[in-house]
Amino acid sequence: MFSKGLAPLAIATVVTLTAAFALVFFYAPLDADQGFVQKIFYIHVPMAIVALGGFVAGGIFGIRHLRSGDAAWDLRSYVAIHLSIILGLGVLVTGAIWAKASWGHYWVWDEPVLVSFLVVFLLYCVYFPLRFAIEDPERQARYSSVFAITAGAFVPLNFTAVRLAEALTHPRVLSQTGGDLPGEMRLTFLVALAGMILLFVTLWKLELTAKHAAMQLKKLRRRRAERREAVPA
Amino acid sequence: MLRAAATILRKDLLLELRTKEAVPAMTLFTITVYVLFHFGLDRNALDGDLASGVLWVTLLLAAVIGVTRLFAAEREQGGIDALLLAPVDRTALFLAKASALFLFLVAVELVAVPAYDLLLLGPGLGGTLPELLVILLLANLGIAAVGALVAALAAETRTRELIVPLLLLPLLLPLLISCAQATEPLMRTDQGPEDLGRWLGLLTLYDVVFVLVSVAVFDFLLED
């Protein structure tokens, strides 16, 4: 059900990511004032964009689940949020490394993007305790979708609030400096972003397939057990 | 729908008046937190950003208690089934619960804010009361909308006492930012230039977004 096109997608991911890393190390020029450390940008920023995109996608799948009542949409939302949390952890770690190298501290509170991302991450971490504290599967799906939608609405609001509250020193990659990136850097960045998106989609489909298969298996086992009980040997 | 909401609200207020569970506990809690801050910060009087931060963190923590108790009566005595069987729109239930929380917060603040002025605040609140009232009312509106939603979300989980603070506090962060920033100039000894408009704008935006989101998704909670 979910596995269609998984193999070509996986191949495309490997090719794009390999190309991205080759570009990062052999093609993109060294940054004039940050040097080699700036290369973490090609992982950190795509990862952050894809993680936030995954959270928002989780909210949209949640809306579709509530509209249609189809449990598959809830599964899509769940897996998207799950993967985004893992990527989010990666964003916080790579961000801290980059911050240490270029600003001298692992954590800088007057960075709106850093702080907003942490808050969003903390909020989404509650998705799991909430989801698994509800036993009834149908209700679990419904409540998780409500959470996904609420949190999805929270993401842009939170970024606005934190940005207004703090000084602006984080590089605004997409809105301002994005236009000034030299051509080689921009190309590398776009390939890295495409690679990260492909990686996310591949993992998402893979996990959906695995979860779906596990559920089918459980259903078959239960049916077999029921049949054995019905017909005593 | 409004009549149904008013009926449920009346029931909740009556229940609170008779049992006195939530509001006294929340109020007592705010005073305790003031004492904690007094010793934790080792300060006798606060002003400026510290004063506004302490006030808002205290009020949000007190709100957590209110939200945890919001569906307590229904849950513990099984009234929720009757409520769900009644031919009432879920939105009415949301309106009632959010209004109850709003009124509880107002009641708590009636004691907690003067007590803060008395116990910890350096500069008096006299001259800036109207501005503070507007901020408090807008904040209560936002807390009530998000709080009723979180209470309903957590009501069906096994670990609701854990879920409520974990879910509510990050969701209220934009509200905390705008309230603390808006209140800060009101609590400075030298009342300097204010940036009230921007923060009130953000606070209003937050309220509008979360009232709409809560009304939209509340129908899907507390079914069956």
Image (cartoon, helix red, strand yellow):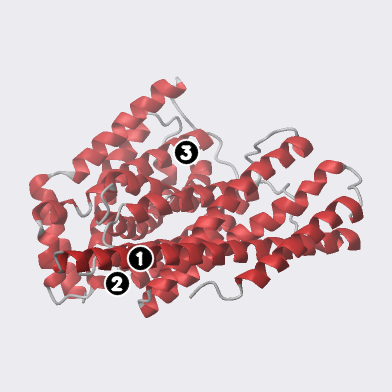
SS for dot 2: loop
**Viewer-closest of A88 and B6:** A88
Q: What amino acid is found at the position of numbered circle 3 in the picture?
A: Gly
Residue A136 placement (x, y as % from top left): 26, 61
- Give the letter of the chain under mark 2: B
Q: Which mark is residue B53?
A: 3
Marks 3 and 2 sit apart, C-alpha to C-alpha, by 35 Å
SS for dot 1: helix
Crowd band around label 2 with a 10 angstrom C-alpha radius: few (<14), some (14–19), many (20+) = some
Marks 1 and 2 sit apart, C-alpha to C-alpha, by 14 Å
**Tag 3 and tag 2 share a subunit:** yes
Residue A197 placement (x, y as % from top left): 66, 64
- Give the letter of the chain under mark 1: A
Q: Provide the residue designation for mark 2.
A: B219
Dot placed on the residue nearer the N-terminal end, 3 or 2 = 3
Tag in front: 1 or 2: 1
Q: Which mark is residue A141?
A: 1
**Viewer-closest of A116 and A90:** A90
Pick the quarter of the image with the C terminus of chain A.
bottom left
Crowd band around label 1 with a 10 angstrom C-alpha radius: few (<14), some (14–19), many (20+) = many
Residue located 66% across and 38% down the image = A108
- In the drawing, does residue B132 fall left or right of residue A21? left
